[in-house]
Amino acid sequence: MKAYCPEEFFSRSELDKVQKTRLATTLERAAKSEFYGHRFAETGIRPEAITSAADITRLPFTTKDDLRSAYPARMLTRPVTDMVRLHASSGTTGSATVIYYTRNDIDSWADLMARCMHMVGIRAEDTFQNMSGYGLFTGGLGIHYGAERLGCLTIPAGAGNSKRQLKLLEDFQVSVVHIIPSYALHLGTVKDELGYTPDRLNLRVALIGAEPHTAAIRQRIEEVYGIKAYNSYGLSEMNGPGVAFECLEQNGMHIWEDAYLAEIVDPETGEQLPDGEVGELVITTLCREGMPLIRYRTKDLTRFIPGDCACGRAHRRLDRIMGRADDMIILKGVNIYPMQVEQVLMSIPEVGQNYLIVLERDGYLDQMRVKVEVKEEYFVEDMRELKSLQSRISSRLRDEILITARIDLVEQNSLPKSEGKAQRVLDLRE
Ligand code: ADP
Ligand code: K
Ligand code: ZN
């Protein structure tokens, strides 16, 4: 397959070389910002002493709190008049953080995004519908610019309004969509209800991301629409989408190492972990002018997949994101990730699209209740069948997370849905 750009098929040694020179440029630029200027002075770091990517461990991390403390503009390397765009994170956790872009930053971001889409066979002939929210959220304009750069006819549908989404899909014979996984499943149900049979649509590919999801969810999305779905990873602090993306092999997401220097560290100690071990993803921007970030702690938990990808790209692969370090549930002393629960639920055929983990306190005891939607065809009157499904779910969960959860079976489409990232955990404990 044709490469989108030379960097896409850089060898390991070419990547190492470009990382080294771009890291030096990045540090030099960062030192001009008020925030990093102080930080380097405080910690006695001379950016010119960092001469290789391996030296990076000598630099301190940048955290979300640092971004907040630098609010609104203390991380800029140049006057704010040189900036052409601003985005903010959707604020899933805590208050929003702001990222600025120069014209070159917007340009290189669009190129990275276009590279991702090109990698999975998207071309100028495709019609692309972006079902991500626009506005401050980077999933809107970020992917939009990438699609336009490839020459796709691009429809900025935005989030929600399922009837209209489906009408657009049919009327313009859309071939590619960008959609949040939880919404993709919901839209799939509406599609069937409204009788959009496969012959009416021309859909081929979905880019799914923005929230953690299991392999089983991807498979369901692929089946519901009869398409291929590719995992797309990014975060506002690193421009937005376009950081790491699955290739046609669908086995891990290549992180573009000419633009991002990635490390996996132990979330407790901050020490780098070897390939294959799960930890927190830490990223340094290598191309950003306006607001470079050094060793930014993403809070996202994943690992490098060891070994080479069959596609021939040398950019290392990230495994699917297990969740954020802050998403971990601690219940009765046991650590649980929502994705572990999802994995169990989605392996049970009767389970529908949506679920909600509710944490409650019963006297002094913490309890987990899982509300589970049951597919229409399995939601029967027969109590015995429902009881047996309930205990099957409960015992599978116990095997996986070592906790006995109360299982509430509810009807399809009865749990609250969001147009953006799904809320998977409701913590009612004080
Ligand atoms: P917020 O932090 O407020 O949600 P962003 O919109 O920048 O703001 O979201 C970025 C975050 O979304 C990532 O840090 C990660 O937790 C999550 N995310 C993005 N893409 C994926 C993906 N493909 N798989 C799992 N999680 C993802
Ligand atoms: K076109
Ligand atoms: Zn690959």
Image (cartoon, helix red, strand yellow):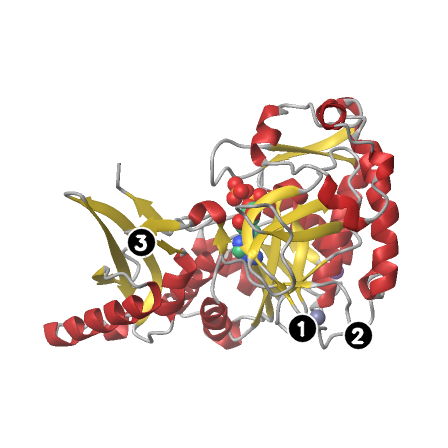
Whether ligand 3 has any atom under 8 Å from the Cβ at mark 1 is answered as yes
The residue at 33%/63% (across/down) is 401
| Label 2 with label 1: CB-CB less than 8 Å | yes
Q: Report the quarter where the C terminus lies.
A: top left
Helix, strand or loop under label 3:
strand
Helix, strand or loop under label 2:
loop
Along the line of sight, the residue nearer the viewer: 182 or 357: 357
| Callout 1 crowding tier (Cα within 10 Å): few <14, some 14–19, many ≥20 | some
Identified by mark 1, the residue type is: Leu
Identified by mark 2, the residue type is: Met
Identified by mark 3, the residue type is: Ile
- Mark closer to the chain start, 3 or 2: 2
Task: List x then y, in percent, for residue 24.
Answer: 85, 41
- Mark closer to the chain start, 3 or 1: 1
Q: Is residue 257 above or below residue 378?
A: above
Q: CA gap, disc 3 to disc 2?
A: 43 Å
Residue 273 appears in which quarter of the rendering?
bottom right
Q: Report the quarter where the N terminus lies.
A: bottom right
| Callout 3 crowding tier (Cα within 10 Å): few <14, some 14–19, many ≥20 | many
Q: Is residue 365 left or right of residue 126?
A: left
Residue 405, disc = none
Task: List x then y, in percent, for residue 160.
Answer: 46, 50
Residue 1, disc = 2
Task: List x then y, in percent, for residue 182.
Answer: 44, 58
Residue 338 visible in the picture: yes
Residue that numbered label 1 is attached to = 248
Residue that numbered label 3 is attached to = 357
